Amino acid sequence: SGRLVIAVDGPAASGKGTLARRLSAHYGLPYLDTGLLYRMVARAMLDAGHDIRDAAAAERIVASFDQAGFAEETLRGREIGEAASVVAAMPAVRKGLIERQRAFAAQDEGAVLDGRDIGTVICPEAPAKLFVTATPEVRAARRHRELAGRGEAATFEGILADIRRRDARDSGRSDAPLKAAEDAVILDTSALTVEEAVAAAVTIVNARR
Ligand code: C5P
């Protein structure tokens, strides 16, 4: 009954995207993967030949960018995840993306959003907040399988190093660092199957709605 906003945050390859998609199907709510917004900014920076650390160029891109121009398969690669975490540390980039995320969450029925700062910054009033984690090794193994499925060659050790670097950057930045909201429920998926994680998440959301 009533509208429901579900905030799903967590580090790279924690399983938050899979969980958020499953929750959106379960409750019949629209879903936004907010990581894609940062990936689009990174893609546009690289396509335009900018240095990924050029904050002035990133700010211009965010001010004028149009989500419609990006194909998802050009956003999922390993290089783009890394570049996205660089632009995501820029306050002007984060600021420029806040309104479209809040507008998405403001839809009548509610919404499911996943990212790093949904429960802390974008939707602090959301009744249901999940912080999804897993050990770096489990996350690296999942990402390794996913990239292999996409035909992208990478070693487990290389991916584990990527994940540790991205965690450090996402947790260490001063603007909207990755962290659990005080009222988030932490869900460690390290030892859970997808079905077990979904069941646990639904139980948590039902208790909060
Ligand atoms: O979730 P995903 O791996 O697609 O996100 C890519 C990068 O975008 C993250 O490493 C993070 O730096 C950034 N991000 C963010 N805030 C969000 C979603 C993603 O800073 N809400």
Image (cartoon, rainbow, N blue to C red):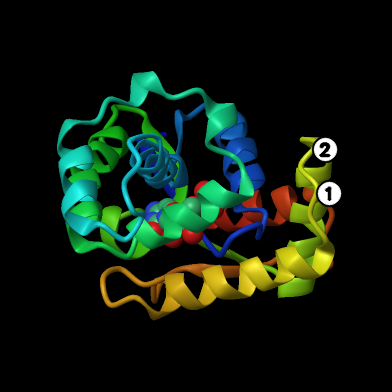
List x then y, in percent, for residue 46: 40, 42
The picture places residue 82, in percent across and down from the top left corner, at 52, 57
Tell me if I can see residue 128 in this picture. no
Instruction: Quadrant for residue 13, please give it.
Output: bottom right
Instruction: Name above or below for residue 146 compared with residue 85.
Output: above
Q: Dot 1 surroundings within 10 Å: few (below 14), some, or many (20 or more)?
A: some
Residue 145 numbered tag: 1
Q: Residues within 10 Å of mark 2 (few under 14, many from 20)?
A: few
- Residue 207 image point, x, y percent: 54, 57
The answer to whether mark 1 and mark 2 are in CB contact below 8 A is yes
Q: Give the residue at mark 2.
A: 149
Say if disc 2 is inside 8 Å of ligand 1.
no
The residue that appears at 17% across and 31% down in the rendered structure is 64
Which amino acid does the dot numbered 1 rest on? Arg
The image quadrant in which ligand 1 is located: bottom left
Q: Classify residue 69 by image quadrant.
A: top left
Residue 35 is left or right of residue 160, and the answer is left
Q: Disc 2 marks which amino acid? A: Gly
Depth check: 101 or 151 in front? 151
Check the image and name the residue furthest to the front. 49
x then y, percent, for residue 57 = 20, 48
Q: In this view of the protein, which residue sits in the foreground, 76 or 184?
A: 76
- Residue visible at 24% across and 30% down in the picture: 65
- Secondary structure at numbered mark 1: helix
